Amino acid sequence: MEQQTANDKRPAPGEAKIQGIGEGEQPTAVGRRSSIVGRWSLVIGDALLVNLAFALAYFVRYELQWFRPLADPAYNTPLKDYASFMMVLTILLLVSFRISGVYEARRGKSWLDTMYAVFNGTTTAIVVMVTIAYVYRPVLYSRLIFLYDGILVMALIGLFRLVLELVTARLRARGVGVDRVLVVGAGEVGRVVMRTIAARPELGYYVVGFLDDDAQKGATNIGRFKALGGLDNLPATLKSENVSEVIITLPWMYYRKIIGMIDQSRRVGVRARLVPDMFQLTLSRVEVDDSLGIPLIGTRPAAIRGSSLFLKRALDLVVGGAMFALLSPIMALAALVIKLDSPGPIIFKQTRVGKDGRLFTCFKFRSMRQGAEGEKQALLHLNEADGPLFKIRQDPRRTRVGQFLRRTSIDELPQLVNVLRGEMSLVGPRPPEPCEVEQYQPWHMQRLSAMPGMTGMWQVSGRSDIASFDEIALLDIWYAENWSVGLDIKIMLRTIPVALFGRGAY
């Protein structure tokens, strides 16, 4: 493979199939056709909504008579007289949407990004339309109807896009309409790609596995992500895994192999993209400073610090305090039934590892019989998790009340005290036990850079159903690197149905 370069002879048409990997062309062609069909479907849908919006605007203007000026000569203009204007406005809006980037297909494009483009396109088209109406028929046509129309166009298209985004995200999370991705390189940059895909299933990527030149890495799975061997396995993997996209995360010292792999992928119709490793920096932590008049590239800490830490702490105090007050009756009732159900303390106290490795005492309602910790060693053979985690779906140490408390997550409510004391946050990585941290690989330690939380990325992504600790660590590190107030609120909202239905809790 060292001799594989961009100057290698390209195969004649059909030669790739003789080599046994020509079938890789199909996913890309199908994906391209689906993209074109999807884009035209959006255009047709928008055209219908634009005309519906105009009909509603006419109803508001002429039937409801909102803000109708006295003696308005345009009052008696029938809807059919607006037909030519409706056609022109539809064309103007669709062209303006195209120019504003409404139909730009980009992974991770948010609803707010789309609405910003819709706003720009709508205002531009409406201004042009009002000008045309004023020049063509300044008396008989109402300019106010176009204002109503612009507002209704943005409302209808915004609602349409929101529903479409929610449905698409749900389908992609279930594996429908996703691109099969092969990651080349299992180093830090490769793990950035994998944890981003794990944290954001709505992007529509499914990682079939990864390749690495290191023999141990190439043979060791990272959670759900399968190790598929060394770099030389690329041609066979493209065929066997039906790959539609290759993401290369190798250091620049591998530039010969990188060029060769890009060429190999291109030959069989598989898209290949390169993630620049930039001195092996975590990409989401790169910052650029031009205060000296020249660009200076460096890194910012992965942990939540400064003003971000202040905002997170304020959110914990406000929301945590409100939750403690509202849930106090439930906690009092839980304490009573625990006391009546089995002998032992109501609150279970355990030493956990917090931010930057600091130890603290974590509080939970006792859900197991007294002395359950001493029985753990004898139950190791029943462990259903991997790595340092210890999880048993039907734990024999659990009490009758404990089963219910675990399933509804009521057992974790006393951790609100830890939140108010500043030892934990409402959202963050699960606080590990010291014995678990002793088993961490070096890259696992990055999850300790954030304050531990009562809920987090892995809990709302499947909770204990994600039995792989590597995958939990990927999600936690992604959270620490991409934190925002909006992300915390989103995770808290997603936690509510997860806790109510007890999905993955044991």
Image: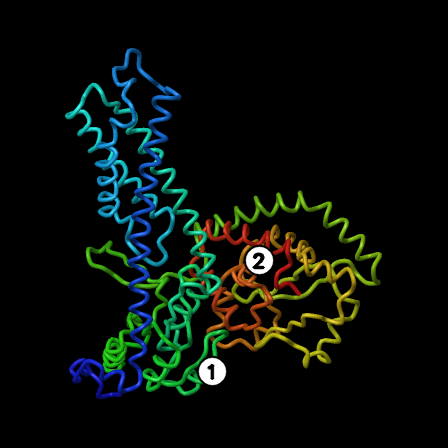
Residue in view at x 41 percent, y 82 percent: 228
- Within 10 Å of the Cα at label 2, are there few (<14), some (14-19), or many (20+) other Cα atoms? many
The residue that label 1 is drawn on is 220
- Name the kind of residue labelled 1 in the image: Thr
Q: Position of residue 26 (x, y in %)?
A: 31, 73
Q: Position of residue 458 (x, y in %)?
A: 54, 63
Picture quadrant of residue 434: bottom right
Q: Position of residue 27 (x, y in %)?
A: 33, 71
- Rendered view: 337 above or below 207: above
Colouring convention used in this rendered image of the protein: rainbow
How far apart in space, not on screen, are marks 1 and 2 (Cα)? 29 Å
- Rendered view: 394 above or below 3: above
Q: Position of residue 366 (x, y in %)?
A: 74, 61
Residue in view at x 29 percent, y 45 percent: 117
Mark 1 or mark 2, whichever is nearer to me: 1
In this rendered view, identify the residue nearer to me: 149 or 442: 149
Picture quadrant of residue 296: bottom left
- Rendered view: 390 above or below 494: below
If you read the primary sequence from the N terminus, does the residue marked by circle 1 or circle 2 appear first?
1
- Within 10 Å of the Cα at label 1, are there few (<14), some (14-19), or many (20+) other Cα atoms? some
Instruction: Say what secondary structure mark 2 lies in.
Output: strand
In the rendered structure, the answer to whether residue 138 lies left or right of residue 242 reads left
Image quarter (top left, top right, bottom left or bottom right) of the N terminus: bottom left
Picture quadrant of residue 248: bottom left
The residue that label 2 is drawn on is 455
